[in-house]
Amino acid sequence: MVLAGGEGKRLSPLTLDRAKPAVPFGGHYRLIDFALSNLANGGYRRMVVLTQYKSHSLDVHISRTWRMATFLGEYVTSVPAQMRRGRRWFLGSADAIYQNLNLIDDEEPSYIFVFGSDHVYRMDPRQMLDHHIASGAGVTVAAIRVPIDQASQFGVIQTGSGTKIERFLEKPTNATGLADAPDQVLASMGNYVFNTKTLIDIVNEDALDETSAHDLGGNLIPMLVDAGEAHVYDFTTNEVPGETARDRHYWRDVGTLDSYYEAHMDLVAPLPVFNLYNDKWPVYTLSRTLPPAKIVYDGTHGAGEIYDSLICAGSIVSGATVHRSVLSPGVRVGAGAVLDGAILLDDVVVEAGAVIRNAIIDKHVVVPKGARIGVDAAADAERFTVSPAGVVAIAKGHTIS
């Protein structure tokens, strides 16, 4: 089960018109492609994606991209809120599972992966399942070390001498650091593997609690911790074919504009922190049918200068300067334009002489000739969304005056 029903408010304006898992990433991928690719590469190819908010583009992406060998019983299918338990939407991630227990009844699995859909990473889920079975846990939570000042963004895990979880704190503001690293905490990655009976029992119990927020991390996992059934899986023990020392155990929660931007900067580094070019554990997606990218010499501005950037199919760059940037399919960059730290989504047009620095521009935006974005902080704040770190974000189809 892949949970894809969140609103993604912190990624606005990128989520004004789409679900968070459908947000484009890395040129031509969608965020959900990373979780689905990990499961598919690991050999788990019966997947349901539980959707809710603004799910149309996500549903279309799944139906067009994620087509499995149906004659082998493989599938990836999106499942909207069906109101099987009453006339209501999903009340939380736990309630989403509760409302779809019929899917479990149909398949009768022994174990169930429940993965989030909005993280960027590579992981072999087979190794996590092996650890889960060996530990005898009812649920296993994948975890990674993060700086303690980020603890309030995650579910924080405290263990005893082994892998058994002693405490699970959902987004604490006063977390205690690890014994061997006081400046770090062990954070949940939002990936779980359950014994089927454990999952069915706990969601049914939670459904009867009218005081519950019906949240997987906030309610179900603490209940299973109290019952002594929860163990942790250390992500740093996971080995994926083809990974390098540089990108091993990379995981990013791209739930904010700043983290989304920083993750793109990881991609364009000369030696990428996350390597999209690992063909032994590929990230699958569906690309548009477009001609190759083209770099054009301009009579006035010459060939321009392009480095440390991803240039997707269908893009044309004419005599422009492009540094540390991602140009998604169909982008056009005019003569004399300057891009530095720019993430441009599909079909953005940057007209001649425009300057864009430290910005995320959603699809179908035209940046007018000579425009300045990311140059004057006060002017940007009046017109656009600006993140705490100063990254400018412009909504899909926005008209820039």
Image: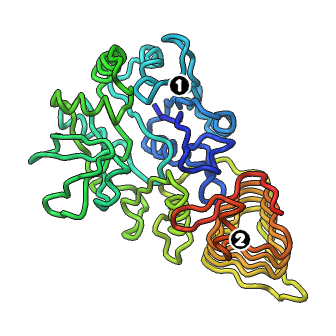
Instruction: Point out residue 376 in the picture as x, y percentages from the top left corner.
Output: 67, 75
Element type at mark 2 = strand
> Which is nearer the eye, 239 or 115?
115
Q: Residues within 10 Å of mark 1 (few under 14, many from 20)?
A: few
Residue at image point 27% right, 22% down? 198
Amino acid carrying mark 2 in the image: Ile
Residue 75 seen from this side: yes
Q: Residues within 10 Å of mark 2 (few under 14, many from 20)?
A: many
Asked if 276 appears above or below 234 in the picture, the reply is below
Q: Is residue 134 left or right of residue 55?
A: left
The residue wearing badge 2 is 373
Residue 12's disc is none
Quarter of the picture containing the N terminus is top left
Element type at mark 1 = loop
Residue 127 seen from this side: no
The residue wearing badge 1 is 73
Amino acid carrying mark 1 in the image: Gly
